[in-house]
Amino acid sequence: MNRLLDYLPELDIAFPSAAAAPAAPPPTQETDAEMTYGAELLEAGAGNGAGLAPFLAGLVARSGAAGRAALRVPLGRALMSALLQAATAAMPFGSKAAQQRGAAIFGLELEGLSPEDKEFALARHFIRLARELINSTLASGPVGPDGNMADAESRVQAALAQAARKHAPGLLHSAAQQEPARGRWQRSGKRIVVLNC
């Protein structure tokens, strides 16, 4: 009985040293830019959101010479319109319901985060979406002054669908739900006749 109490094994416990611990990967330039633009987006959207359009125009202009040129032609106007619509749909500028809607659009689970962290996470995801949209739109063809608005809008919508599939799948679903059913119909007795379909 006394043998159990007298037993003192020698244990070799290895304590991890600071040098042996793997370091976190250094932040990339892409991540730094995403965080910076996310913080700027939250500042621009604060209050009444008056700074949102200039911020988004600056984001397009920062994409290079093609982005700066696009802002002066119909393609840039269509791109800015799409960016503003996406920002107002996805960003939670001050409201808890808007945070939940933004989380659903980006497919995020934000439980347990502070309200500020939720807004920042949504802002970073929006920046990813916006940069993908800008790059896809500018890569879809030349930016020329002679482009018409219908062509510009179709190019932007195609790029938006591509970017939303990758970064904000809920944006596609919310757009489909908001689209009203179109067409004309009339009742003929117990039947409904659809016109112009």
Image (cartoon, helix red, strand yellow):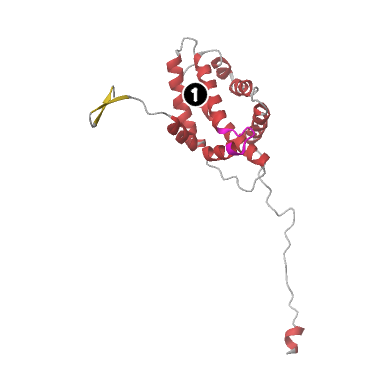
Q: Is residue 91 magenta?
A: yes
x, y (%) of residue 165?
A: 47, 35
x, y (%) of residue 14?
A: 72, 64
x, y (%) of residue 108?
A: 55, 43
The residue pinned by badge 1 equals 137
x, y (%) of residue 157?
A: 45, 25
Residue beneath the point at 64% across and 29% down: 41
Could you say which quadrant of the image residue 56 lies in? top right
Q: Is residue 110 magenta?
A: no
Image quarter in which the N terminus is found: bottom right
Q: Is 53 left or right of 105, judged from the image as shown?
A: right
Q: 149 or 33: which is nearer to us?
A: 149
Q: Residue furthest top?
A: 146
Amino acid carrying label 1: it is Thr
Q: Which residues are magenta?
A: 90-97
Question: Vertical placement of 141 versus 170: above or below?
Answer: above
Q: How many marks?
A: 1
